[in-house]
Amino acid sequence: MCCVGGVSWTEQPIHFIDFEGSAASGILEYGVATVVGGRVADAQTRLCRATGRVRAEDVAVHGIEPEAVAGRAPFSEEFELFAGLRESGPLAAHFAGVENGLIKSVWPYPRRSPDFVRAGCSVLEWGPWIDTGRLYPQIYGGLASANLGALIDAFGLQAELDAAAARWCPPERARYHAALYDALAGALLLARLAGEPSVTDVSVAWLLTKSTLDPEKRAALEQGELF
């Protein structure tokens, strides 16, 4: 029987994900930063072989040259990792539509996983996602920008991000538009909400619902919270 998903979000592992790549090239790099207890507890990353053309305009953004990934295993070999992450906690991203689209282009569905809106239920979906790009403008009205770097600057997190990047990122990938660096930036934004009085004690279900802007999908999630 399903019931309301009332677990406090700070007690639940949440896996913040970022991908570099495109529909043309496939996923060239992933970064995962796990948040639990209001802190970044673990992180992992690697480069992945392209499945299509790596366009020059994309290299100009993410800095991953085709020859740098030619000998790597493809992202498709990481199903056990990402399915396991989804089983252990909800996935998160900053403006999650890109990450959701890219992961579904490789594996349309994970294994059956917990529904973090309706406790005791399970779903066959990568989402819903916790989305800091959607949460921050709702929690903090009047933000000049919801861009990842702008939020890191606005909330004074650059020194913390630098320290996290020095610990976990490959030195040459400690920059924006590198997967783990961006994942860590988003994870720190999420983690700092543990100290925000209006958000400290909310449930995972609340974060998932507020991360969903589509009216019909949000209404369905709100029904899940109620019932």
Image: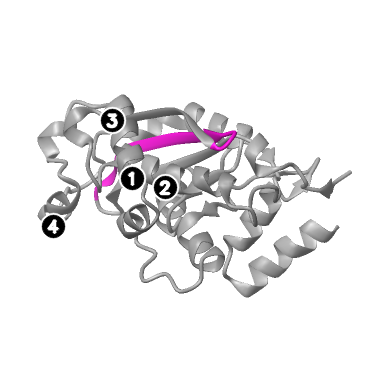
To which residue does mark 4 refer? 57
Left or right relative to 158: residue 220: right
Foreground mark, 3 or 4, reads 3
- Evaluate if marks 1 and 2 touch, with contact meaning CB atoms under 8 Å apart: yes
> Element type at marker 4?
helix
> Element type at marker 2?
helix
Magenta stretch containing residue 31, yes or no? yes
Q: Position of residue 45 (x, y in %)?
A: 34, 30
- In space, the residues marked 3 and 1 are separated at their CA atoms by 10 Å
Q: Earlier in the sequence, mark 3 or mark 1?
A: 3
- In space, the residues marked 3 and 4 are separated at their CA atoms by 24 Å
| Residue numbers of the magenta segment | 25-38
What residue sits 33% from the left and 45% below the top?
A: 182
Q: Position of residue 63 (x, y in %)?
A: 15, 44
- In space, the residues marked 2 and 3 are separated at their CA atoms by 14 Å
Of the residues shown, which amino acid type is indicated by label 2?
Gly
Task: Answer above or below: position of 167 versus 221.
Answer: above
Q: Where, quadrant-wise, is the N terminus in this rendering?
A: top right
To which residue does mark 2 refer? 186
Q: Which mark is residue 182?
A: 1
Label 2: few (<14), some or many (≥20) within 10 Å?
many
Q: Which mark is residue 12?
A: none
- Evaluate if marks 3 and 1 touch, with contact meaning CB atoms under 8 Å apart: no
To which residue does mark 3 refer? 169
> Element type at marker 3?
loop
Q: Earlier in the sequence, mark 2 or mark 3?
A: 3
Of the residues shown, which amino acid type is indicated by label 1?
Asp
Q: How many marks are shown on the rendered structure?
A: 4
